[in-house]
Structures are given as C-alpha cells and as structure tokens.
Image: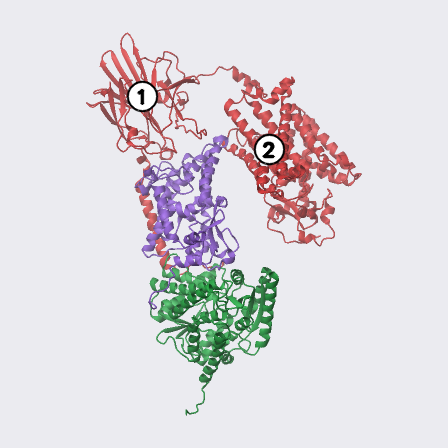
Amino acid sequence: MVEFIKRDKNDIFNKPLLGFLLKNRKFLMSLRVVVSALFFYGIYYGFAHPGKENLFTGALFWGIFWALFMVATLPSFGRIFCGICPHGFLGKYITKYGLQKTMPKWMQNRYIGITLLVIGWWGIYYTFPSFWKSPLTTALLFYGVTLLAFTFYIIYKDMSYCKYICPIGTLTRAYDKLSFTKLETYTDSCKDCRTFECASACSYNLKPFSFAKKNQADDCTLCMDCATSCEAVKFTLTKPSEQLFSRFKTLNAEVWTYILILGAIPISMSFAHGLNRTKIADSMIWNQTANYFGMSEYAGGFAFAYAIFFTIFFSVLGLFLASKVLKKEYTLTFATLGYAYAPLFILGSLGHTLGSFFTSDYQEIVGGFAQAFGLVVEVEPLAHRGDSWLSYFGVLKWIGVLWAFILIYKRMKLIEASKVRKVFAYFFSSFLLFFFIGLNFYSGYVFKTYGAKERGDSMHKSAMGALKKERPQSEGSYAKRGQMQESEPIYFTLTDPKKAVSGSKRGSMSHGSGDKKRVPSKEAWLVYGKDITNAKAIPEIQIETFYYDTKKKPNELKVEMKKGSRVYSFETPENGYYNLYAKSEIQTDKEFLYKVAKLEYLSGRHGVETLYSPKVKERVLTDKTKIDLIRIKKDEENSFFYKSVMGEELAFKALFESLPLRDATLVITMQSGWSKKVQTDEDGVAKFHIIRDYFPEWGSFDKRHKEEMLLTLFHMPKESEQYILTYPLSFYPNSSDYASYGYALLLISLTLFISGVIVYRFRKNRTKPFSELRHEE
Amino acid sequence: MHEHKIETPNEKQNRHKAMESVNVLNTLKEGFKTPPKAMDYFYNLFEDVYCNQKALHKDKVKVGTMCIQIPSEIIYALDGVPIRLCNGFYTDDEIGSDFLPQKACPLVKASVGHLSSKNLTDKPDMIYSPTTCDQKTKAGTLIASFGYEVVDVDFPRTKESEISREFFRRSIREFSADLSQKMGKKLSRKNLKASISKIGYAQSLYHQISEFRKNKIVPILGNDIFLVTNAFFFDKIDNWIEATEKLVEELEQRVKDEVNAAGKISPRIVYTGSPPIFPNYKIPLIIEDSDGIIVADETCSSNRMFNDRVAVDEWFVNDMIDSLADKYLKACTCPVFSKNDDRIRRIVELVRSHNADGVIYQAFAGCTVYELEQRSVLEAMEREGISILYIESDYSPSQHGQLSTRVEAFIESLKIKNRNKK
Amino acid sequence: MKSKIKKIINNMNLSRVRFWIQLFSFVLFVYGGYFAIDLGSKLPIFTCPYNEQSGATCYLIPLQHQLSMPAQILLGGAGISVIVGLVTFLFWFIFLNKAWCGYVCPFGTFQDWLTSLRKSMGIRYSTYTQNQFERLSKIKYVLLAIVLLAPLLMGVGALGSEWSAAFCQICPARIISPMFSGDLSQWKIDFSTKTSMILTAIGMIFAGLFLVGSFIKKRFFCFFCPMSALHFIFSKFSIVQLTKDGSKCSTCGDCYAVCDMQIKDIADDVKSTNILRDDCILCLKCVAACPENDALHFDIFKIRAFSSTREGFEKRMGLHKPKGDSGE
C-alpha cells in the first residue's frame, strides 16, 4: 500500500474538485444511494401509475439513464455508468453474503448479455414499437432485471452477473475503450507492493495493479473502491481512445458488440425510422419482404433483421477480405481491426440524444421529476426542432466516421505486413464505414429527391394530421380571373408574387447548389397592379414571351406552373445582361392595346469574372416588339455586379419601330407610391434621378435595402391606339450614404501618426531591449 | 673577444623560451616526414618571434585579448591588432607561479607570468578580459596590478537563456563602444563588414584545410595545423592569409599526389580539451610520435576560433555586432558554460565527419572546467561507441615517459580495433 | 552531373532568386486580371479579390462564405462544398507548404519591399523580445478563430449578416491590395450598421498599423496571419519540408539572425528534425545563412533540394579574398 504519491499532471485525482469527489467515499456512497433510490422509486411509480399520465418513469429510465447519461459518459469519462448502477452498488453487498459459487463455464459467456440486449430489447422495440413505451412495461422490465440480477449475485461470486449476463455489461465494457480516461496504477510504486490492497478491495476480483501493463481495465466499472484503498491508483486523462492505439488482449465479444449495436441502433433506425418516412418507403426491401409474408404490421422487425444482416455482412466480408490481403488469420484481423468500428455508433447516437435532449427530453425530464415529487415547474424546451444550431450535433456522426478511419489506420500499424497490402486491407476493412456513409448519403438523397411521406400516412398516424389534410388549401392572394383591367400594364418581377406578401424583401441568396453541372437559371413572374410590393400574378391571358441572352440571341422563355402560378424561367449560363420581353396585343372594340413588359436582368455570379468588356453592355435591338425602352449605360459601368443606387441619374432611350420615340411619356412609380412623369426628347431620351427615400434610424440602416420602381412608357400615336411598355428596376442605398472616405482617411492617418510616433519614441529611448523582471511587492 | 655579461632575468627568460621553441620547431621540421614547404613561413615566424624577439606590429595599436570571446572583427575594424595572450611556455609558467596558487592552470600561470615580466615583443596597449573561467577572470585583475590597462568584458556562464543572449550582446556593444572611443575611430558599416569578411575568409581557409584532413590520406600533421592556427594569435593577418593560401594550394597538390603525412594504418585522432599553445605541443607530439594522426581538434586555440561564422541579414553596424556577439556566445563550445551539450555534439560531429578512430581528451592539471567536463564527455563517447583517452598534463617536461606509454597503448588498441573491424 | 547541379543550387544567390520569384508571383496575383488569369478561389495566400485585377482569390473568402451558410444547408449536402474547397486548398498547399508565404504571397512580397525600402533608407528594423514574440504569435490563432467562428455563428443566426466575412472587414489586405491597381474604394468606413462601422474602422486601423509595422518590422503582418495558422495545421502533409540535422548544428545563431520571423527554434532546437514552426514563412534564408554542411535543408519528397553548405555560405556572405592591403 502506498500512503503518499506525487501525482502526474494528467491524473484526475490531482484535479481540484473531481479529485476530491472521486476519492471521497462518503460522496460516492451518497451518490449511489440517491441513484438507487431514484431507480426503485421509478419502478414503484411505474406500477403505481401504469397509464400514459405517468411521465416520471419514462423520463427517468429512457430520458436520463439510458441514452443520455450512458452515451454522454461512455465516450468521455468511460464506464462511470456502471460505477453508479444500483445493481452493481447493491450487488456488492449481496454477493458478500451470498453463496459465492463459481459460475458454470457455459454461463461465462459474454455473448449472453449482448444477445439479450439486441434481440430482447431492440428486436422487440422495432417489431412492436409501442411495447416498451408504457410506464408499466418499463417498470416490469426493470423489476424483472433487478430480480434476475440479485438472484445471480446471491448465487455466484465476483459479480459474474455484471460480466456475463447484464445486457449492457459487455456494451459498456466495449465502448469504455473510447474514453479519454484510464484507471491504472503508478507502476513504479506497485513494483515493491506485496499487499495488493487494490485487488482485495475490488469486488470484481480484478487486479488494478496490472491494468497499466495490460493496457486495459478488464471489467472495471470505475467504482473507485481501489482508489480509496491505495494512493497508487491513478485515474488519468489520455487522448481519446488511446487504449485502442496500442495492443491489448482483445475480446471478440467486444467487436461483435460494436457490430451488432451499430446494426441494431443507427442502421436499424435509419431503416425503420428514416427511410420508412420517405415517400418511397414501400419499395424498400424490408417492407417488401414483410408484405410478401403478409406481416406488414411488423415491418419494423424486418427492417431490424435486414439492418443486422447488412451490418454483419459488410463487416465480416470486409474483414475477411482484409485478412486475405494481409495474409493473416481471420480471427486476428477481426480482433485487431474490428475495434476500429467502435466510434461509429456512439458519436452519432450522442448527437441524436443531445439533439432530442434540447428539443424535448429536457422538458420531459423536468416535467417527470416535477410530477414525481409534486413540484410545480413548467419549462420550455431548450430548443425547437429545426433550430439551426441543433444541426451541428449532426457533425458528431461524421466525427465518429473520421475517428473510425483514424482508428483503422492506427490499428493497422499493429499488424505486420507490407505497405501495399495494408493499403488494400485498409480499403476492405473500411467496407462497413462505406456502408454507413453510403446509407447516410442515401437517406439524405431519398429525402431530398422524393421527400418525406405525408405525416398522415406514416406510422405516426394522428388525428391532427388527418384534420390538416381535410382543410382546403388556401390559395393566398391568387387573383381571380377577370379582375385585371385590360389596359392595366403588366410587368415582370423576379420575386414570387405569392411570397412577396410580407414586407421585407431580402434578395434571396442561392446557396451551394452543389450540382456543378446544372446550368443556373432564373425565374420570373408576370404581374400587374399598382402596388409594386404587392403585385398580383396575372391571370391566364394570351401572351408572347421571349428573351435575349448575353449573346443577344432571342430564345423562348420556359413556362411552367409551379404552386399555382406561372413561372417564366430562363437559363443564365454566363454573366451578363438578359433581356426578357412579354408582349400582348389586344384589340377591343374601342381601342388597340399593345402591351410590352420588359426586364433587363444582369446576371452576376461570384466566382466568375467581375468586370466585363464594353461589348457586354451593347444594347439589344429587337424587331419582335414595336416599342422598346433601353437603359443607356454609363461609360464607367463595367461590373457584372452593377446596381442602381439612390441619387443616381438614369437615362433611357425610347424606341418605336426601332426609331427614337419623342414626346412619349415615361412614368416612374416608386415603391413608396411616389411617381413622376418625364417626356422623351427628340432623341427619344429621358433622364431622371432616382430619389433618395430611405431614411431609417441609424441603428436600423440596411445597406442591402432594396427598393423597386416601375417605369411605364406610354405612347399614343392615335386616340384608339395605345402602346404601353413596362420596365421594372430595383435600386439600393447609395454607398455615399453610409461609407465615409473622410473618416477612413482620418483614422488611418491618425493610426499612422500615432503608431509612427510611438515607434520612433520607443526606439529613440530604448535602453532596455528586454523587459526587466520585477517582483511584486 | 666580447666581455662577459651577467644575464638579466629577461634575457634568461628569452633564452629559456628560445630553447623551448627551438626544441619544438626542430621536432616539427625534422622529426616527421617532410612537412609542406609552405610551413616554412610558420616555422620562421615562430623562430623570429620567440627566438629572435622580433616585433610584428610596431606602428599599430595592439589589443590584448585574454580569451577567444573578444571579437577580433571589431578590433580589426577599428584598425587595431588583436593579440591573444594565452601562453604555452614552461618558463613563463614558472614565473607565473609566484602570483597564482601552485594548483592553478599552467596556461593562466604562463600568461600572467609572461605579462608580469613585461618582456613582450608586441606589448599590448590595452587588454580586454572576458569573464570566462574563474582563473582567467581573476588573472585579468592580477594583470591590471602589473600596470596594464585591463577592461573586463562581462561574459555569461550559461548560454541557453534569452537573458544571456541579450546580456552578451550588450556586453559586446559596451566593448565596441569602449574600444572605439580608445581608438578614436568609429565603427562603420563599411569597415566592420570588411573585417568580418576578412576574418570570414581566413576561416574559410581553415575549413578548406579541414576538408583535406577528412581524406583517407591526411596530407598534414595535426601539430603543423596547431602551429598555423596558433600563428593567428599574433601574426599580421594579411601575411597569415597569404601563407595559409599557399599552404592550401600545396596541400591540394599533396592530396592529388597522395602524400600521406601519417603512416598507412595510423589511427585517426580527434584532439580535445585544454588548448595546446606553442610551444606546449607535448601531447599532440606524443600522439603523432606514436603513429597516431590528429585529423581534427576541438580546442580554443584552433577549431573553436575558426569554426563559427557570422551571418547578417541587413548589414547595419548594430546587426553585425549582435550577430558577432551571438557567434562568440551561442556557438562557443567552451566548457565554462553550465551545459556541455554543444561541445559533445561538436566532438561527435568531428569524429563522424573526419572518420576518426578515437578521441584524446587532454586537460591541464588545474584547468578545472576541462577536468570537470571530462566525465560528461567520457560518458557521451561511451554512449556513441567512440573510444576515448583522458589525459591530465601540465607544462613541465618531466612526465613525458608516463604520458607516452598511455598514449601509445591507446593508439595500439585503436589499431587492433581497426584490424578486427576489417 | 548530379553533384554539379546540386552545387549550383546550393551556391545560388537565394535573395536574388527569391526576388524574381516574388516579383513574378506578385505580378501574377496582383495584376493577373489584366492577363485574364484566374487561378481559382482556393489559393493559400492573401491574393485579395477586393483588388479586381487579382489573378486568384484568397481561400479565406470562400471559406467564410461557405461557413456562413445557414446551418441546415451547411450540414445538409452543402457541407460537401466546404470539404471540396478544403481539398482544393490543400491541393495547392501541399506543393509549396509555407513557401506560399515566403515566395508567392503578394502581401508578403509587399512587406518585403517595404523592408527593402527601409533598408535603403538606412533605418534599422525592430524586433520583438522573446517574451513579446511568444505572446504575439498566438494572435493568429485568435484571428483564425474569427475566420471560422464568425461565419458559423452567423449561420446559426447568432450574428448578423455583416459578419459573413468578418475577417475580411478587418484584414489590411482588403484595404491595401486594391491600391495596387489604383483602386482606393476600400478606404472607407461603413456606417451602415454598428457592427460594420466597428469592423471597417478596425480594418482601417489595422491597415495603418500594417503600414507602420511592416516598415519597421520585417514581415510584420505574418505573425498575425490566420492563413499562416491554417497552413501550420496542414504543414505536415506537404511534400516539401524544412529539415534540420541537429548533430551538425553549432547553435551559432546565424539562421536566427537572418530570420524575418524571429524563430528561435531554428537555432536552438537541436533535437527536432522537422524545424518548420507555425510562424515560418519558408523563405529559406536560414538555409542560405547556415555555414554548416547539410545542417539545414529544404526537402522535396524527402530529397534534399537545397542544403546549407559552407561553400554556399561563403559565396552568399561575400567572404572572398580581401583585395589589397588591410584596407580601412
């Protein structure tokens, strides 16, 4: 026994708070008593309130203990779940006064626990989804398990139940290897030890003094009994999964645990909950098999079986091929490389659990405890489904994948083979990873392409969903046929008139289309109405549309119906000006109406060139319409990102039958309703300034504030003939409204001056090239 | 014919020193295979200076230096001549014994003795004494009491820390300011750069010779090289450069002609420890007498003076001074420093690059720092698998027999080792 | 033949070679637009696209843009574009490692020119003390954190859209690079929101500090450059490395004396073989200034491409036979 020891820096026992608590028997004892009390109270509460109104039992067992606490601690601190487990805690005392028999050989089989877990719990969970969910079954389950455990503790010695029978015993032992802690001893001190207090203190009959040498802690449950018995025991911080970087005595059951749990949890979930929610769920193989056997209610069970099968198939096949390539025995390859699969499940699961903790579990747990202890606490969930920051938990899964890749690399080092062989073996042993990644991508793809099933016909059938379906879909402000006056001008808009209801109009940012091959395209709508911000989509009328691309070639606009409105789209493969036209001629008994809607769209995509040659702004001359209005571009305009700004003078040239049109009226209507008329001069040119009408408070100034205006050109050669052309335009605040060169110059000059002076003075006065050491007094 | 004259003490001292000198020079000239012709310049130089009392720098300001840590570049830049005052004469050693304890280092005793006699051909006008080892530090003050102008130059005894770097940079700045004031001349970018390149060129000549000594056939004896580098202590630098250039040329020819200064199977020795200073070539002569050949050395009278160079990014005076300070501190492998690692690495590197068979480590009895570091070097060599012999000696001619037995035995063992290797 | 080429390379006048490479890449990256050169947007150097004539785009811009996507989009599929971007960046990076800084980065070159201007004016440079150096060299990681975190926080809605390229707003390259093509439009303070006002004001101050700093301190900005921090994370993967043979090192400090970045390890560390430190710009001045044969070398695929040699050192330092009698 060692009384005093100089602890390493990374020894957790050396840390101020944790060190004290973990080595404090009273604290550990009371912690375990509290946990056990909660455990039994939860069981009692389940029996007492078997109905759905019981929130506590579910919250305690499925909210805190399992899932959250376990997946959060296993890859971090290790098996502390077992350290506070009521079974282990009470078992220690029971076994002391029990029969102390040796467990029969056939029962000393680590596969028992894991089989119970995978088949008994997860198999049933998928096949009969609601079976374990009621508080009563939960209570029954834990009651049963507790009885079983205690029976085993009474009969057999050395906590054999934990090692072999406990459904999560092997699981925690296996995933503990990922943690960044390690319980071992200061071997230098142990060399001279002859008393082995650590071993005699251990209820599990383990030898803590040998952990360091063996590079593993066997069945240690981090109960800390040894640590309180001898000072030489240390609990160190290591690199995450450091144990797995080097050799230790491998256990096939652990590798099988990784594989089976991966199959039973994330992959089955992805089958039964993920893909089953998509529209093409019915074509999935498990659903088809279930239908073939006529057992479609138990499709979840089939999904589970398939998931297990695929997982085993890919892992075994991959490792088998790897062993062939490496020219090593299969068992050796399996045991060595299989450990690399450990992080796959646990991190993804952690992300999932944390996500649901923030969205729902937190509320449920607090609610459950409040119910059980008669408190009145009402809490809001910490986050709402769809909060964007929650999606960062999804990254954990990919960290897990990356970690697994690293582990394969690290563990490959433990095998002796040539480099080329190892490269191929790496590829083969990554099969399971590829399957896992592929499945994730596939379900993402399926959701994106086919979309989710309507809530109503998924397995979560609810009355609410049914109600929603019945309700007639409101069609928004879709204009009814015939409301539009025939003489009313129509014009193009680039924003969906249905979405435009709300006031704020941010230029929609198109983000990462990803698919590089697809030609970008732009959508436009034809609308009418005085209020530019709230224009209405035009009803179906006879209209001819076309556009000129950057090469000034005419093309047809593509027309399709989307969500009830007509969308005109055109491809914008290159940066430059696209000119859209819509033309309609209406001959009524009284007059002839010739309406043209024009839109000049400047496509400027980032990542391509910014500046253009003068050729780009050459005007398009169309012979397809009689009337045209062309913005005269200034000499200094040369950017694909040109924007009109407030205060800028714009010049337009009106053309009629390709000749300058004089004395036509150009009406400028601003979004605010302000409008102005100008006449074209003899060259057909009309000029005007965009007014500055954006005067917000300084704090709420938005330099991306976008306003619209509409130019309407009227030309009436005869009393009964009217030509109307519309030309919408958007503009932004002038940068001189918010960008100051003067202040910038002042600031930089000041900086230059002050820092210059400081440097000069410092260098002039410098006698001490290094700062002297001063003692505090 | 001429009247009988009573010999003055100085005359006696000169006579004794001439005897010591002639003894060594004759051995070098005749005791071995024909030395290179270019060596004659150096033989004559030593004869002129130590037998005929010829002054070399009559019209120049002579700046005495007690150790290598005084940058000679700065002295040359200011038009002075650095004279290194380390001394190897038994005669002077005995004179110095009056001033220092019996167990003190013979080198220090000899230097003090020489200066106390005031019988110097090129008497230094001022002396700069870096505070290196205890004995040198104390010797500075002692010498000042003889009426010399001695200036202490602070020298740190550790060199890894940032403080020591800054400390010595400051110290050298002080030194150069002091010297510049005394010389009445300013350091300029031009004169300092010129003297740095001149010394740099002299160093490159040494390195060229070192390259020849790496060959299987070694064209020159280690003792001759000690003589060449020793001449750098006091010779006119331009003459030295010219003579060494000739030596380099001749050695190049010798390499082509495969002229071997040593025997066919002579073990190659790296010499380290207390510096052999003319005429105290006792151990080097024994080594090469016993059919060893010194291919490289790690001593402050030779390698340490030439090995390290100065590099500057921008040739400003301050930069050059800082870089000089770094060279004399950071690269220095003197055992006075708290840690001896750099020196060990240098020795190992020399052994490897010169393909040496063994190391002979000589320390003067009383030269505490070398005696102290003996253990660390021996340990390191054992780790590296390099044979090493540690010898303690002094300036007295008495223990010749015992020393040569030990050296011979060591060299024999190296020969046997080589034979077994084959 | 091989040894001859080796000798020529090892004896080369590095500063001249470097000057021409830097000049070439400066023209390429600052004025590439005039020659219709566009090397993409993932370059590991400060070739700032705010300068409309730049021949490529600094990777930090697309990186910030990509990270500022709404989190759902970023983590669903669009994350691939981040990875593709990173891979492209790495593809560029592995060829030159940090030599991108020392040889290609136009912003670095500009600092070197300011340095030569100062040198020709006879003003000595300033240095940091070791203490300051250690503290200051951490700033680049802080800036890297801004580069990465500000857009991410914006993506989850915690910060406004002004933060999408927050680092660019405070980066002096944004203000100074466009000046090379006569564009002073970045010299402004944006008063549109408080955030952008503060950020652009900091940008202006940094630009001022940059001008003063890099005039008196060699490679002033590189100490703080987040790109340099990003480089260092990946520097081990590069095919080119700076290696040191500690057994040949005499710790004379010549390399430290010429190091623009004041990296002390280059002289004092005799244990590491990979001597590339996070501040290093791989300018190879240290190799050129090392008087020991093969003590420092620049490796491509572990083959010594440029080694320190005694001969090369003597050539570069001008240690030739003195002319005439003792001159001064």
> Which dot marks residue A438?
none
Q: Chain of mark 1?
A: A
Report if residue A503 is visible in the image: yes
Identity of the residue furthest to the top in this view:
A589
Q: Nearer the viewer, residue A283 or A113?
A: A283
Q: Chain of mark 2?
A: A
Query: Quick check: A742 above or below B322?
Result: above
**Which residue type carries mark 1?**
Lys
* Residue A292 horizontal side relative to residue B56, left or right: right
* Residue C232 horizontal side relative to residue A109, left or right: left
Q: Nearer the viewer, residue B30 or B354?
A: B30
The location of residue A409, given as percent across then percent down, is: 58, 41
> Which dot marks residue A598?
1
Visual hue assigned to chain A: red
Residue receiving disc 2: A432
As drawn, the chain in green is B
* Residue A647 horizontal side relative to residue B61, left or right: left
Identity of the residue furthest to the front in this view:
B257
Visual hue assigned to chain C: purple
**Which residue type carries mark 2?**
Leu
Q: Are marks 2 and 1 on the same chain?
A: yes
Disc 1: CA contacts within 10 A as few (<14), some (14-19) or many (>=20)? many
Q: Are marks 2 and 1 in contact (CB under 8 Å)?
A: no
Query: Quick check: A733 above or below B202?
Result: above
The location of residue B145, given as percent across then percent down, is: 45, 78
Res. A159 image quadrant:
top right
Q: Is disc 1 placed on a helix, strand or loop?
A: strand
Q: Earlier in the sequence, mark 2 or mark 1?
A: 2
